[in-house]
Amino acid sequence: MKSRNILLFSGVAALFVATGLFASWNQALLILNVSLISAVIAMGVNLQWGYAGLFNAGVMGFAALGGLAVALTSGRRAPDAFAAGGLQIFAALALAVAVIAGAIFLWRRMERGRARNIATAVILVVGFVIYRMIFDPAVARVEAVNPAGTGNVGGLAVNSLWGWALGALLAAGAAWLVGKTALGLRSDYLAIATLGIAEIIIQVLKNEDWLARGVKMVNDLPRPWPVPREVDLQQSARFVEFVRDWGWEPALASTIFVKIIYAVLFLVVLGLVIWLSERALNSPWGRMMRAIRDNEVAAAAMGKDVTRRHLQVFMLGCALAGIGGAMMVSMDSLMNPGTYNPLRHTFLIWVMVVVGGSGNNWGSLLGALLVGWLYLIVEQVGPTVMGFVTSGMADGPLRMHLIDSAPHLRLLSLGVILLLVLRFAPRGLIPEK
């Protein structure tokens, strides 16, 4: 089995090397970095599904919260916009939390009956009205301050590595709220609930300009330490002299060098995640989670708090999704809510876990590298391949349509790979032991 796993990873490594040799190392490193980020998110899904049998169809939303965390921590400061209404916005949000907490407290303390229903409704309605009276004017003032450049409360202008940690906390906090209400649902209802919540998160990020500029985007985010900018490397006399001694162009060399540093940084994070996940899987906690996954009734009869453990693993998996989303925004230096879609940030991650082998961390890593490479390379080479295939056709609308539609071959290729794996290796390429 070990030799087979080594052979599988060697084959995937050969795909990346071949991409560098026959296409470009710049492209190979870009695909590798995206795949490594996807592997971190896939580890989170594997925690939820492979360890506990929880079907989370809202991975996209938790990854987006991680990206938001980077925009809030490393984004440029906007002192004028914050002074116009930033404190008032956060005061309104604190009031909203207090109103909800007060309503929950009242609901639990009062006896069941009509009086409890009326009192809770009054608190919520009055609290909502006061909240909007404070929140709306403050948002209008903030968004009116230089909307072309800022129009939001701004960031803290600190290293985006802090955003990775905050992304995990934001995603885990959202997972706690979701889990408290949705984890009691049946698996198919849980999938629908998490999918809907993810869409709500994306719509909030798109429409609340005061938070992270919405669809106007937060761009030019600073690189995480210790990643430099390509322009700075090209202006460094030592770097230019070094790469020219090796016969490389400074512009191309700086791009490759930056991607290598990103790859090392992502490998450190991924290695830590795999190490912790393996220790958890082989610990009494991991055996308990698998027992709950296989038979909740039997586990509950043995005294295990199934709901609490489900909430725990759900939060951990979403935290990893938040870290992955933060890593992606840090690499792109751009926070754009419009780029989040279920195909890329939920379905593709699930394909990685299923193809690699759910319940096995190394399987999720293999699936992320293989499917990530396939998803991105087909988009790049698809038009070339389709142009060769249709070379015998006369120039016309049909041939142009086939060539223009070539990037969609990645969907076909993903479907074929998924069908082949489910047919010949239904437990994945590296199944759970």
Image (cartoon, helix red, strand yellow):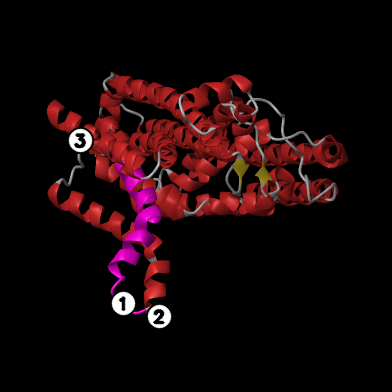
Quadrant of the drawing holding the C terminus: top left
Residue 110 picture location, percent across and down: 62, 40
Give the residue drawn at x 82%, y 45%. 142
| Mark carried by residue 393 | 1
Say whether residue 422 is left or right of residue 375: left
- Span colored in magenta: 367-394
Q: Is residue 178 visible?
A: yes
Name the residue located 31 percent from the left edge and 71 percent from the top edge.
Answer: 390
Secondary structure type for disc 1: loop
Q: Which image quadrant for residue 290?
A: top left
Query: Which mark lies nearer to you, 2 or 3?
Result: 2
Per the rendering, the mark at residue 187 is none
Identify which amino acid the numbered label 2 is placed on: Gly
Secondary element under disc 2, as helix, strand or loop, is loop
The residue wearing badge 3 is 8
Q: Please state which amino acid type lies under the numbered disc 1.
A: Met
> How far apart are the two marked residues, 2 and 1, measured between alpha carbons?
8 Å
The quarter of the displayed image where residue 280 is located: top left
2 or 3: tag closer to the N-terminus: 3
Q: Depth check: give the residue in front, 69 or 90.
A: 69
From the viewer's perspective, tell me whether residue 363 is left or right of residue 105.
left
Q: CA distance from mark 1 to mark 3?
A: 39 Å
Quarter of the image containing the N terminus?
top left
How would you rate the neighbour count of disc 2 (Cα within 10 Å): few for under 14, some for 14-19, many for 20 or more?
A: few
Q: Label 2: which residue?
A: 396
Main secondary structure of the magenta stretch: helix
